Image (cartoon, rainbow, N blue to C red):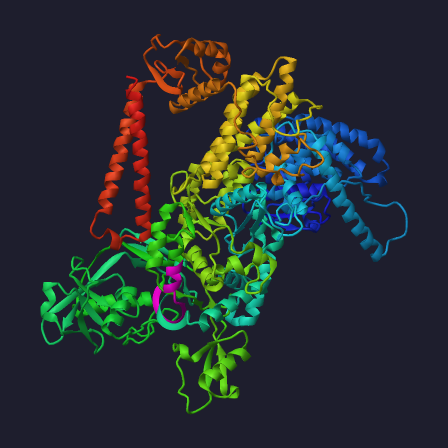
Amino acid sequence: MTTLYVSPHPDDFRSLLALLAAEYGPSSRPQIITEDPPASLNARSRPALVLAAAGDGDSLVSGATAVSWYLAFQGKRAGLDAKQQSQVWQWLSFADNELTPVSCAVVFPLMGLQQTSRAELMRVLKVLDQALAPRTYLVGESITLADMAVATAVLLPFKYVCALEPSDRKAVTNVTRWFTTCINQPQFLKVLGEIVLLSHAIVMFPLSGPPKTEAQLKKEAKKREKLEKFQQKKEMEAKKKTHPLPDSYSPQYVEAAWYPWWEKQGFFKPEYGRKSISEENAKGIFMMCIPPPNVTGSLHLGHALTNAIQDCLTRWHRMRGETTLWNPGCDHAGIATQVVVEKKLMREKGMSRHDLGRENFIREVWKWKNEKGDRIYHQLKKLGSSLDWDRACFTMDPKLSYAVQEAFIRMHDEGVIYRSKRLVNWSCTLNSAISDIEVDKKELAGRTLLPVPGYKEKIEFGVLVSFAYKVDGSDEEVIVATTRIETMLGDTAVAVHPADARYQHLKGKMVLHPFCDRKMPIVFDDFVDMSFGTGAVKITPAHDHNDYEVGERHNLAFINILDENGLLINVPPPFLGMKRFEARKAVLQALKDRGQFKEIKDNPMVVPVCSRSKDIVEPLLKPQWYVDCRDMGKEAADAVREGRLKIIPDHHLKTWFNWLDNIKDWCISRQLWWGHRIPAYFITVNDPSVKPGEDMDGHYWVSGRSEEEAREKAAKRFNVSADKITLRQDEDVLDTWFSSGIFPFSIFGWPNENEDLQVFYPGTLLETGHDILFFWVARMVMMGLKLTGKLPFKEVYLHAVVRDAHGRKMSKSLGNVIDPLDVITGISLEGLHAQLMDSNLDPVEVERAQQGQKSDYPNGIPECGTDALRFALCAYTSQGRDINLDVNRILGYRHFCNKLWNAVKFAMKTLGDNFVPSEKVQLSGEESVSDRWILSRLSAAVTLCDAGFKAYDFPTITTAIYNFWLYELCDIYLVRIFTSQRQALVCRQTLYTCLEVGLRLLSPLMPFVTEELYQRLPRRKPQSDPPSICVTSYPTTEEVRKRRGGQLVLNLTDTIRSLRADYNLTKTRADCYLQCIDSATVSLVQKYSLQIQTLSYSQAVIPLTANQPVPEGCAVAIASDRCTVNLMLKGLIDVEKEVAKLMTKKGDLEKQMEKLREKMGKNDYKEKVPVKVQEQDAEKLRQSQIELEKVKEAMDNFRKMI
């Protein structure tokens, strides 16, 4: 194994360089040792890299440059080609010979060179600053060894401000920006930790004076902390006014510092700007709780989508002046967390949880949670989520645990929670019941071998086995078929349809079980499908959900043949004690031996797989706790029917009503140790007159807030003294969804009355993915109404599912699962491959996944930044449609950020240093047509954004903002900026309004870059304007409403631009003929023809009278009652070719729709196809119909031109 020897000193930049290179190296990183290498190696210095176990000279590399080059080369960070490698070597030489000596001389005053070297350090840094002016990194488009070497060489001056004052850093803006970018890379953070660029000088090595006492040191530390806070605030103010914008946009630089400042200033708290949350706010209250992510989890793109949407909405409401709270929280994730800690225990100590015992195991879980559990909070902050972290909740916190206990006891006392023995989803590996959401439905096309935990060989699924039961007292037999042949050992009947003529003569007859003396009735039941197989079905009431109901209806025996570990019980030898899938083979062979086997054939089927353990889920009869959901479900459904609760988009209503109108009772107990232990006690009465109870008998169970309370309840129930009662608390814990179901009010301390509960419950909105509509949303509504009498929120907005660019579901085995942090910071293809090696995929799946990554990301994922990712996710979020996420489109929005950056930089030069904006947005009356036009476009963008936010129409918002900044402000208005001095004064005010309002419009979606740019703008009211863009007011239609004057010219411009967009003329200019109703209109058009031409991006603008003919080949649109627009398309587009393309698309759509209708029209479609797939099919048909109508409309428009 490769070993790296480094210095333990935290400021040894040579060792730090080697460690950084190792972090960027291949997945198999070297072993790190902070000691001198063995003498036998003859290593001249540290760092030293031992490449092999042998001691010969070829196995050793020593010295910072040699070691780091070797490691960086291995990790493909030494340059992509010969030219880049040469540039990297140049920077290594620069770091060694120019930077390192002067950095050391300045930082270490004992060398006596500090003052004389400061000027030299600044000279060297200015050389570096010039090189970085047009670049994000020193070589290429990502971090290389050049950046690592130069960053570590300049680390000491930046880290210890005695060497580099804040004023010095401002003189080398590009270096500061680049250095901040580097040290915030994950690899740098891992090696260097968090580097704080202090704002005041500190002395590293005092030359004299006695050592200070501990009290003095504490006092100084406290004083230093206060001074740092003051200096940070002071520096923030200075940055707003004097700190120049770096020459190029860098996401890492922009996103590095703003979040801590926002958090420290309290901008995310509802108390900000008001004395109390109870203070009346005429603008209203907005409250939303986060869907609590699992404590075991890390971010995936589903989280990123959820948080991008929720944070945009939260920031929008906050900027509207509402009392705004977005409450964070984390779920204890019972099964997931227990599995993680159990694996950790086994890996590190070779122990199971049973070896530790319950109490010690719970301590281990809490220890793990305290060490690792806040990881996802850090990731949420990286996404810019404006959550009130002081109100963060964990579902196992005492406050929430008390609420869970109270909810159970109240519902149990009322009889809504009850005890019963029924079929549950059982995981033999976990030894626990699991919820439906933890069961993956694996679809098989036919015979398939699947791995199952506990079995060396893969197990066969996807086949249908037919065999015969002999009819008692005759030579006849009844042939049945099953996909789980081992369950025939628990059969207690055969069922046929009452109308099936083939079996009428068998009424009252019995069939014989081949392996025991069991006689089983032939029952007649409507659930049997006469057309499937022989029309006869084996019935196993204790191991199949449908058979369970048949067993109930016909009073059949329920024989449980599986124990909790999946071993066979209650069966005859030789099957007794066998593992379930070994019994599968044994039963099949035994049937063959007896001559009762008929055939095996492929059978498409769905196999239930436990998402946590990957075990095959078994239906198993177990006594469990259930919630009676009938009345609660009706109330939840009625709340939507009556309009008290709104679900958006409304195509989810059918699913909502279908589920709640046919709701089944909810199993809430889990056989785990980690979670909320059920506050229920089994009663034993030590009195001979009282009959002993059974576990499934609810009469012998009592709940209580303490054992004493439970004992009193039990004594009262059985009319005996308390000393005759013995209690045993249930070992099980509650389903995680139970605590999640009361999350909207438990986070505020329910059932105890307090200010937060009074102000923020009920909430305003619940935003989440549609995949947990039942598991979480419906249960919150039911439990909120049941326990508080109030709906937990007024609206539910359900976003779509994220898929890859090809429309495939995100799957690790396909290699298309993307960590949003990789999109934000960028990652190489090798880095993506390395992540697969750390996963639980088998080698075949890893190979397939790597091929998928190589195909989709041949050059890795480029650095896009948080703002671009957020904007892209919101731009994709059209209601009701899954999101096919293309990373290249996210990169496009990264370029949009760059365009934004350059536009503001250019505009600020235009405004000048002495520009003073007017106190409010207003017209002087001297605005040019261009000024009025850009203000009208700004007004239109504000209107669209306002409507978009209110309707949760995020693509409308992103399109409006993108078009305004890119196509209207940058492409048109900025390129023809004013000329005359008088016009300049008016134009500057217009330009400032566009910048300031445009940034505020964009702020909820791109909080980092808008804050950075907004802080550079002068304020309208410097003394009273808010300190941050995130707490300024969101632009309103009243603030920038359309102004009168020159309306015809503006209408003409908008109409021409709209026609251009309809025919996709993005770059091509076309002649425009404007047919006017009278001579006055002709004169007006002639007067402003140049402005119309420029603003509409036309080739030429030709006014025509009503009598003049319009040339052929024009697209037509009416601008007003006085003028019609005719846009010449002839020669610019091939009309017949466009129609042919649309005809092909029309045919494809019609074929798709015909296939879907044929599929949905089959007789057994509603019975056999899962509800979720039916919903997806209906949505596909709806979307295809809309697309078809648009294609037909486009064809009609083109045909008019032929």
Q: Position of residue 1147 (x, y in %)?
A: 25, 31
Q: Residue furthest right?
A: 209
In this view, the residue in front, 894 or 698, is 698
Determine if the magenta segment contains residue 185: no
Q: Quadrant of residue 470?
A: bottom left
Q: Position of residue 1172 (x, y in %)?
A: 34, 51
In this view, the residue in front, 4 or 844, is 844
Identity of the residue drawn at 46% across and 73% down: 413
Q: Is residue 461 above or below residue 27?
A: below
Q: Quadrant of residue 359?
A: bottom right
- Left or right of 574: which side holds 360? right
Region rendered in magenta:
618-635
How many tags in the picture?
0
From this viewpoint, is residue 51 visible? yes
In this view, the residue in front, 483 or 680, is 680
Determine if the magenta segment contains residue 634: yes
Q: Is residue 1152 above or below residue 916?
A: below
Q: Position of residue 709 (x, y in %)?
A: 53, 78
- Left or right of 1145: which side holds 872? right
Q: Is residue 1015 above or below residue 793?
A: above
Q: Is residue 40 above or below residue 788?
A: above
Q: Quadrant of residue 441?
A: bottom left
From this viewpoint, is residue 56 visible? no
Q: Position of residue 106 (x, y in %)?
A: 80, 36
Image quarter of the C terminus = top left
Identity of the residue drawn at 35% across and 52% down: 655
